[in-house]
Amino acid sequence: MSITNIIPQYRPGKNGKNGSQKDSGQLIDLHQVTKVYQTAAGGYQALKEIDLSFNQGEFVGIIGKSGSGKSTLINMITGIDRPTNGDVWVNGTPVHKLSENQMARWRGKNLGIVFQFFQLLPTLSVLDNIMLPMDFCNILPALGRKKHALALLELVDMVEHADKLPSALSGGQQQRVAIARALANDPPILIADEPTGNLDSKTADNMFQLFERLTKEGKTVVMVTHDSSLARRVSRTVLIADGEVVNEYVARALPSLPPQVLLAVSHKVQPVRYPAGSFILRQGELGEKFYIIQQGTVEVLLSRPYANDVVAERMGCGQYFGEISLFKNTRTAASVRAVPDGPIDLLALDKRAFDGLLDESPEFRDLIETVVSTRTNNNGSREGLVVGERQG
Protein backbone atom coordinates (compact mmCIF):
# COMPACT_ATOMS: atom_id res chain seq x y z
CA MET A 1 0.00 0.00 0.00
CA SER A 2 1.29 3.46 -0.86
CA ILE A 3 1.91 5.83 2.02
CA THR A 4 0.27 8.62 0.06
CA ASN A 5 -2.98 6.64 0.01
CA ILE A 6 -3.01 6.85 3.80
CA ILE A 7 -1.27 10.11 4.62
CA PRO A 8 -1.99 13.43 2.87
CA GLN A 9 0.85 14.65 0.67
CA TYR A 10 3.32 16.66 2.71
CA ARG A 11 3.32 20.38 1.97
CA PRO A 12 6.52 21.97 3.25
CA GLY A 13 6.21 24.83 5.70
CA LYS A 14 7.50 28.23 4.69
CA ASN A 15 11.05 29.04 5.61
CA GLY A 16 11.20 32.44 7.16
CA LYS A 17 8.50 31.81 9.74
CA ASN A 18 8.59 34.55 12.36
CA GLY A 19 10.37 36.65 9.76
CA SER A 20 13.95 35.74 10.57
CA GLN A 21 15.04 32.82 8.36
CA LYS A 22 16.03 33.17 4.74
CA ASP A 23 14.13 31.19 2.12
CA SER A 24 16.87 28.59 1.68
CA GLY A 25 14.62 25.70 0.66
CA GLN A 26 16.20 23.52 3.36
CA LEU A 27 13.91 21.57 5.65
CA ILE A 28 16.48 21.23 8.45
CA ASP A 29 19.20 23.84 8.92
CA LEU A 30 21.79 23.96 11.71
CA HIS A 31 24.11 26.96 11.82
CA GLN A 32 27.20 27.13 14.04
CA VAL A 33 25.61 24.78 16.58
CA THR A 34 27.76 24.18 19.65
CA LYS A 35 26.78 22.13 22.71
CA VAL A 36 28.77 22.24 25.95
CA TYR A 37 27.82 20.09 28.94
CA GLN A 38 28.97 21.10 32.38
CA THR A 39 30.56 18.27 34.35
CA ALA A 40 32.44 17.97 37.63
CA ALA A 41 35.66 18.07 35.60
CA GLY A 42 34.57 21.20 33.73
CA GLY A 43 32.93 21.87 30.40
CA TYR A 44 32.65 19.06 27.84
CA GLN A 45 32.09 20.16 24.24
CA ALA A 46 29.86 17.58 22.59
CA LEU A 47 29.28 19.52 19.36
CA LYS A 48 31.62 22.08 17.79
CA GLU A 49 30.21 24.74 15.44
CA ILE A 50 28.10 22.38 13.34
CA ASP A 51 26.86 23.68 9.98
CA LEU A 52 24.49 21.16 8.41
CA SER A 53 21.32 21.17 6.34
CA PHE A 54 18.92 18.59 4.90
CA ASN A 55 16.35 18.93 2.13
CA GLN A 56 12.89 17.45 1.74
CA GLY A 57 12.92 13.84 0.58
CA GLU A 58 16.47 13.04 1.70
CA PHE A 59 17.34 9.78 3.45
CA VAL A 60 20.30 10.70 5.64
CA GLY A 61 22.42 8.36 7.72
CA ILE A 62 24.24 9.82 10.74
CA ILE A 63 27.24 7.64 11.60
CA GLY A 64 30.17 7.81 14.00
CA LYS A 65 31.70 6.05 16.96
CA SER A 66 30.08 6.01 20.41
CA GLY A 67 30.58 9.39 22.04
CA SER A 68 31.19 11.15 18.73
CA GLY A 69 28.12 13.40 19.13
CA LYS A 70 25.50 11.61 17.00
CA SER A 71 22.76 11.50 19.61
CA THR A 72 23.49 15.06 20.73
CA LEU A 73 23.09 16.21 17.12
CA ILE A 74 19.74 14.43 16.83
CA ASN A 75 18.64 15.98 20.13
CA MET A 76 19.32 19.43 18.67
CA ILE A 77 17.02 18.70 15.72
CA THR A 78 14.23 17.23 17.84
CA GLY A 79 14.43 19.93 20.50
CA ILE A 80 15.04 17.32 23.22
CA ASP A 81 18.14 19.36 24.03
CA ARG A 82 19.13 22.92 23.18
CA PRO A 83 22.35 24.30 21.71
CA THR A 84 24.70 26.31 23.88
CA ASN A 85 25.28 28.49 20.83
CA GLY A 86 23.94 28.51 17.30
CA ASP A 87 20.61 28.24 15.50
CA VAL A 88 18.43 25.24 14.69
CA TRP A 89 15.67 25.70 12.11
CA VAL A 90 13.31 22.84 11.28
CA ASN A 91 10.48 23.22 8.74
CA GLY A 92 10.64 26.99 9.06
CA THR A 93 10.60 27.10 12.87
CA PRO A 94 13.45 28.37 15.09
CA VAL A 95 13.50 25.34 17.37
CA HIS A 96 16.16 26.86 19.63
CA LYS A 97 13.75 29.67 20.58
CA LEU A 98 10.69 27.60 21.52
CA SER A 99 9.43 27.36 25.09
CA GLU A 100 8.86 23.90 26.60
CA ASN A 101 5.10 24.10 25.98
CA GLN A 102 5.62 25.28 22.40
CA MET A 103 8.22 22.59 21.85
CA ALA A 104 5.95 19.67 22.76
CA ARG A 105 3.19 20.73 20.40
CA TRP A 106 5.59 21.65 17.61
CA ARG A 107 7.34 18.30 17.92
CA GLY A 108 4.06 16.41 17.75
CA LYS A 109 3.12 18.08 14.47
CA ASN A 110 6.49 18.20 12.71
CA LEU A 111 8.49 15.18 13.80
CA GLY A 112 8.01 11.46 14.02
CA ILE A 113 10.59 9.88 16.32
CA VAL A 114 11.53 6.20 16.28
CA PHE A 115 13.63 5.08 19.26
CA GLN A 116 15.94 2.10 19.59
CA PHE A 117 13.91 0.73 22.52
CA PHE A 118 10.50 1.45 20.96
CA GLN A 119 9.12 3.55 23.89
CA LEU A 120 5.58 2.20 23.48
CA LEU A 121 3.33 2.74 26.51
CA PRO A 122 2.98 -0.74 28.04
CA THR A 123 -0.55 -0.31 29.44
CA LEU A 124 -2.08 0.86 26.14
CA SER A 125 -3.00 -1.35 23.22
CA VAL A 126 -1.11 -1.08 19.94
CA LEU A 127 -4.03 0.86 18.44
CA ASP A 128 -4.20 3.27 21.37
CA ASN A 129 -0.43 3.87 21.23
CA ILE A 130 -0.84 5.09 17.66
CA MET A 131 -3.93 7.20 18.40
CA LEU A 132 -2.29 8.95 21.37
CA PRO A 133 -0.24 11.46 19.26
CA MET A 134 -3.40 12.27 17.28
CA ASP A 135 -5.28 13.02 20.50
CA PHE A 136 -2.45 15.20 21.77
CA CYS A 137 -2.09 17.35 18.65
CA ASN A 138 -5.78 17.31 17.69
CA ILE A 139 -5.05 17.49 13.96
CA LEU A 140 -7.43 14.83 12.70
CA PRO A 141 -11.17 14.78 13.56
CA ALA A 142 -11.79 12.50 16.52
CA LEU A 143 -14.10 10.21 14.57
CA GLY A 144 -11.46 9.51 11.93
CA ARG A 145 -8.53 8.71 14.19
CA LYS A 146 -9.20 5.02 14.67
CA LYS A 147 -9.57 4.46 10.93
CA HIS A 148 -6.33 6.37 10.32
CA ALA A 149 -4.46 4.37 12.99
CA LEU A 150 -5.67 1.06 11.52
CA ALA A 151 -4.51 2.19 8.06
CA LEU A 152 -1.06 2.94 9.45
CA LEU A 153 -0.94 -0.48 11.11
CA GLU A 154 -1.84 -2.03 7.76
CA LEU A 155 1.03 -0.10 6.21
CA VAL A 156 3.50 -1.81 8.56
CA ASP A 157 1.72 -5.21 8.40
CA MET A 158 0.57 -5.05 12.03
CA VAL A 159 -3.18 -4.48 11.75
CA GLU A 160 -4.00 -7.95 13.11
CA HIS A 161 -2.22 -7.01 16.36
CA ALA A 162 -4.16 -3.78 16.94
CA ASP A 163 -5.77 -4.88 20.21
CA LYS A 164 -2.67 -6.46 21.77
CA LEU A 165 -0.43 -4.90 24.41
CA PRO A 166 3.19 -4.16 23.36
CA SER A 167 4.47 -6.89 25.69
CA ALA A 168 2.76 -9.51 23.50
CA LEU A 169 4.84 -8.48 20.47
CA SER A 170 8.37 -9.29 19.38
CA GLY A 171 11.01 -6.59 19.15
CA GLY A 172 10.62 -6.29 15.40
CA GLN A 173 6.84 -6.03 15.71
CA GLN A 174 7.13 -3.33 18.37
CA GLN A 175 9.46 -1.33 16.15
CA ARG A 176 6.99 -1.50 13.27
CA VAL A 177 4.30 -0.20 15.60
CA ALA A 178 6.67 2.56 16.68
CA ILE A 179 7.09 3.61 13.04
CA ALA A 180 3.32 3.68 12.57
CA ARG A 181 3.03 5.85 15.68
CA ALA A 182 5.73 8.18 14.36
CA LEU A 183 3.62 8.69 11.21
CA ALA A 184 0.39 9.35 13.11
CA ASN A 185 0.26 13.12 12.51
CA ASP A 186 1.82 13.05 9.02
CA PRO A 187 5.08 14.75 10.05
CA PRO A 188 7.40 15.92 7.25
CA ILE A 189 10.41 14.52 9.11
CA LEU A 190 11.10 11.10 10.59
CA ILE A 191 13.95 10.84 13.10
CA ALA A 192 15.20 7.32 13.81
CA ASP A 193 17.77 6.91 16.59
CA GLU A 194 19.45 3.50 16.21
CA PRO A 195 16.12 1.98 15.10
CA THR A 196 17.63 -1.38 14.09
CA GLY A 197 19.92 -1.83 17.09
CA ASN A 198 17.75 -4.53 18.67
CA LEU A 199 16.49 -6.20 15.49
CA ASP A 200 17.62 -9.18 13.45
CA SER A 201 19.02 -8.49 9.98
CA LYS A 202 15.85 -9.47 8.09
CA THR A 203 13.60 -7.25 10.21
CA ALA A 204 16.13 -4.41 9.96
CA ASP A 205 16.13 -4.73 6.18
CA ASN A 206 12.32 -4.62 6.06
CA MET A 207 12.34 -1.47 8.17
CA PHE A 208 14.95 0.11 5.94
CA GLN A 209 12.82 -0.61 2.87
CA LEU A 210 9.90 1.16 4.56
CA PHE A 211 12.10 4.21 5.22
CA GLU A 212 13.08 4.18 1.54
CA ARG A 213 9.41 4.20 0.54
CA LEU A 214 8.74 7.10 2.86
CA THR A 215 11.50 9.22 1.33
CA LYS A 216 10.33 8.44 -2.20
CA GLU A 217 6.92 9.81 -1.23
CA GLY A 218 8.24 13.07 0.25
CA LYS A 219 9.30 12.38 3.82
CA THR A 220 12.73 13.30 5.10
CA VAL A 221 14.32 10.49 7.12
CA VAL A 222 17.32 11.12 9.39
CA MET A 223 18.66 7.88 10.85
CA VAL A 224 21.42 7.38 13.39
CA THR A 225 23.01 3.99 12.91
CA HIS A 226 26.04 1.87 13.78
CA ASP A 227 25.10 -0.62 11.05
CA SER A 228 27.61 0.00 8.25
CA SER A 229 25.65 -2.14 5.78
CA LEU A 230 22.58 0.06 6.23
CA ALA A 231 24.62 3.27 6.24
CA ARG A 232 25.90 2.43 2.75
CA ARG A 233 22.32 2.29 1.43
CA VAL A 234 21.14 5.77 2.42
CA SER A 235 21.16 8.60 -0.13
CA ARG A 236 23.52 10.69 1.98
CA THR A 237 25.87 9.98 4.88
CA VAL A 238 26.97 12.40 7.59
CA LEU A 239 30.01 11.26 9.57
CA ILE A 240 30.51 12.72 13.06
CA ALA A 241 33.92 12.60 14.76
CA ASP A 242 34.80 14.31 18.04
CA GLY A 243 31.72 16.51 17.87
CA GLU A 244 32.41 17.76 14.34
CA VAL A 245 30.99 16.91 10.93
CA VAL A 246 33.54 15.38 8.57
CA ASN A 247 33.36 16.93 5.12
CA GLU A 248 31.13 14.52 3.22
CA TYR A 249 33.21 14.70 0.03
CA VAL A 250 36.38 13.90 1.95
CA ALA A 251 34.60 10.94 3.57
CA ARG A 252 33.29 9.76 0.20
CA ALA A 253 36.68 10.03 -1.51
CA LEU A 254 38.72 8.39 1.27
CA PRO A 255 36.31 5.95 2.95
CA SER A 256 38.99 3.59 4.24
CA LEU A 257 40.54 6.20 6.55
CA PRO A 258 39.58 6.37 10.26
CA PRO A 259 37.18 9.19 11.26
CA GLN A 260 39.87 11.19 13.09
CA VAL A 261 42.10 11.19 9.97
CA LEU A 262 39.16 12.20 7.78
CA LEU A 263 38.48 15.04 10.20
CA ALA A 264 42.13 16.15 9.97
CA VAL A 265 41.87 16.20 6.17
CA SER A 266 38.59 18.14 6.42
CA HIS A 267 40.32 20.80 8.52
CA LYS A 268 43.09 21.28 5.94
CA VAL A 269 41.26 21.32 2.59
CA GLN A 270 40.20 24.60 0.98
CA PRO A 271 37.33 24.99 -1.51
CA VAL A 272 38.21 26.23 -4.97
CA ARG A 273 36.20 26.65 -8.18
CA TYR A 274 37.45 26.50 -11.75
CA PRO A 275 35.39 27.86 -14.68
CA ALA A 276 34.11 25.56 -17.41
CA GLY A 277 36.88 24.40 -19.72
CA SER A 278 39.74 25.76 -17.59
CA PHE A 279 42.88 23.75 -16.80
CA ILE A 280 43.56 22.63 -13.22
CA LEU A 281 46.77 20.71 -13.97
CA ARG A 282 48.90 20.80 -17.09
CA GLN A 283 51.00 17.94 -18.31
CA GLY A 284 54.67 18.34 -17.40
CA GLU A 285 54.14 20.63 -14.39
CA LEU A 286 55.24 19.87 -10.86
CA GLY A 287 52.20 19.02 -8.81
CA GLU A 288 51.29 21.53 -6.11
CA LYS A 289 47.94 20.32 -4.80
CA PHE A 290 45.82 17.24 -4.11
CA TYR A 291 42.22 17.68 -5.31
CA ILE A 292 38.90 16.11 -4.28
CA ILE A 293 35.92 16.73 -6.56
CA GLN A 294 32.82 18.16 -4.85
CA GLN A 295 30.62 19.00 -7.83
CA GLY A 296 31.11 18.81 -11.58
CA THR A 297 33.29 16.75 -13.90
CA VAL A 298 36.92 16.93 -15.02
CA GLU A 299 38.63 15.44 -18.06
CA VAL A 300 42.06 13.80 -17.93
CA LEU A 301 43.89 14.70 -21.16
CA LEU A 302 46.93 13.01 -22.69
CA SER A 303 49.02 14.77 -25.31
CA ARG A 304 49.76 12.98 -28.60
CA PRO A 305 52.50 13.95 -31.05
CA TYR A 306 51.08 15.79 -34.07
CA ALA A 307 47.49 15.20 -32.95
CA ASN A 308 44.85 16.60 -30.63
CA ASP A 309 44.85 15.72 -26.95
CA VAL A 310 42.87 12.59 -26.12
CA VAL A 311 40.45 12.36 -23.18
CA ALA A 312 41.74 9.39 -21.19
CA GLU A 313 39.16 9.55 -18.41
CA ARG A 314 36.36 11.60 -16.89
CA MET A 315 36.10 11.99 -13.14
CA GLY A 316 33.24 13.23 -10.97
CA CYS A 317 32.00 13.82 -7.43
CA GLY A 318 33.90 11.91 -4.75
CA GLN A 319 36.97 11.18 -6.87
CA TYR A 320 40.41 12.69 -6.47
CA PHE A 321 43.56 13.42 -8.43
CA GLY A 322 47.04 14.93 -8.16
CA GLU A 323 48.34 12.80 -5.30
CA ILE A 324 50.97 10.82 -7.23
CA SER A 325 52.88 13.85 -8.48
CA LEU A 326 52.97 15.16 -4.90
CA PHE A 327 53.96 11.84 -3.37
CA LYS A 328 56.74 11.08 -5.86
CA ASN A 329 57.76 14.70 -6.43
CA THR A 330 57.49 14.17 -10.19
CA ARG A 331 55.97 16.12 -13.05
CA THR A 332 52.42 15.31 -14.03
CA ALA A 333 52.00 12.93 -16.96
CA ALA A 334 48.60 14.29 -17.99
CA SER A 335 46.50 17.43 -17.91
CA VAL A 336 43.25 17.85 -16.03
CA ARG A 337 40.59 20.42 -16.93
CA ALA A 338 36.98 21.21 -16.12
CA VAL A 339 34.57 19.94 -18.79
CA PRO A 340 33.53 22.63 -21.29
CA ASP A 341 29.87 22.62 -20.25
CA GLY A 342 30.21 23.47 -16.55
CA PRO A 343 32.46 24.70 -13.71
CA ILE A 344 34.12 22.37 -11.24
CA ASP A 345 34.06 22.70 -7.43
CA LEU A 346 37.06 21.13 -5.72
CA LEU A 347 38.58 20.71 -2.28
CA ALA A 348 42.30 21.42 -2.49
CA LEU A 349 45.06 20.25 -0.17
CA ASP A 350 48.37 22.05 -0.77
CA LYS A 351 51.71 20.24 -0.77
CA ARG A 352 52.66 21.36 2.73
CA ALA A 353 49.39 20.08 4.21
CA PHE A 354 49.62 16.90 2.12
CA ASP A 355 53.15 16.18 3.35
CA GLY A 356 52.07 16.98 6.91
CA LEU A 357 49.32 14.38 6.74
CA LEU A 358 51.77 11.82 5.37
CA ASP A 359 54.01 12.43 8.39
CA GLU A 360 51.22 12.60 10.98
CA SER A 361 48.99 9.75 9.81
CA PRO A 362 50.33 6.27 9.00
CA GLU A 363 46.86 5.40 7.65
CA PHE A 364 46.96 8.30 5.17
CA ARG A 365 50.49 7.41 4.07
CA ASP A 366 49.57 3.73 3.60
CA LEU A 367 46.54 4.68 1.50
CA ILE A 368 48.45 7.06 -0.76
CA GLU A 369 51.37 4.63 -1.12
CA THR A 370 48.97 1.88 -2.16
CA VAL A 371 47.28 4.15 -4.69
CA VAL A 372 50.62 5.22 -6.13
CA SER A 373 51.75 1.62 -6.53
CA THR A 374 48.49 0.54 -8.11
CA ARG A 375 48.18 3.42 -10.54
CA THR A 376 51.79 3.59 -11.67
CA ASN A 377 51.85 -0.14 -12.33
CA ASN A 378 48.51 -0.20 -14.10
CA ASN A 379 49.84 -1.53 -17.40
CA GLY A 380 52.16 1.46 -17.68
CA SER A 381 49.16 3.75 -18.06
CA ARG A 382 50.36 7.34 -18.31
CA GLU A 383 47.11 8.70 -16.97
CA GLY A 384 47.73 6.65 -13.85
CA LEU A 385 50.47 9.09 -12.91
CA VAL A 386 47.95 11.85 -12.29
CA VAL A 387 44.64 10.21 -11.50
CA GLY A 388 43.87 8.92 -8.02
CA GLU A 389 42.10 5.71 -7.19
CA ARG A 390 38.57 5.88 -8.50
CA GLN A 391 36.01 6.39 -5.73
CA GLY A 392 32.32 7.30 -5.49
Image (cartoon, rainbow, N blue to C red):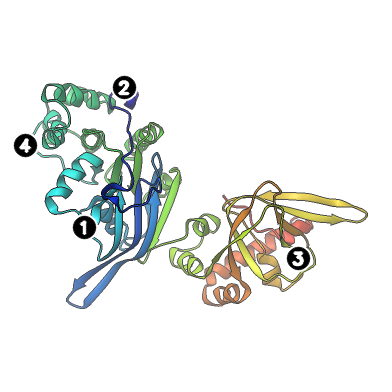
The label on residue 5 is 2
Q: Residue at x 22, y 53 (%)?
A: 79
Characterize the local packing of mark 2: few (<14), some (14-19) or many (20 or more) Cα atoms within 10 angstroms. Answer: few
Looking at the image, tell me whether mark 4 or mark 1 is earlier in sequence order.
Answer: 1
User: Label 1 vs label 2: CA separation?
Assistant: 34 Å
Q: Residue at x 25, y 62 (%)?
A: 83
Q: For numbered disc 3, what is the local secondary structure?
A: loop
User: Label 3 vs label 4: CA separation?
Assistant: 70 Å
Q: Residue at x 33, y 34 (%)?
A: 11
Q: Residue at x 32, y 57 (%)?
A: 70
Question: Dot 3 corresponds to which residue?
Answer: 332
User: Label 2 vs label 3: CA separation?
Assistant: 58 Å
Q: Report if the CB atoms under discs 4 and 2 are less than 8 Å apart.
A: no
Looking at the image, tell me whether mark 1 or mark 3 is earlier in sequence order.
Answer: 1
User: Label 4 vs label 1: CA separation?
Assistant: 28 Å
Q: For numbered disc 1, what is the local secondary structure?
A: loop
The label on residue 123 is 4
For this orientation, the residue located farthest to the right is 306
Question: Residue type at mark 2?
Answer: Asn
User: Label 1 vs label 3: CA separation?
Assistant: 51 Å
The label on residue 134 is none
Q: Report if the CB atoms under discs 3 and 4 are less than 8 Å apart.
A: no
Question: Dot 1 corresponds to which residue?
Answer: 81
Looking at the image, tell me whether mark 4 or mark 2 is earlier in sequence order.
Answer: 2
Residue 142 screen position, x and y as percent: 11, 25
Question: Residue type at mark 1?
Answer: Asp
Looking at the image, tell me whether mark 1 or mark 2 is earlier in sequence order.
Answer: 2
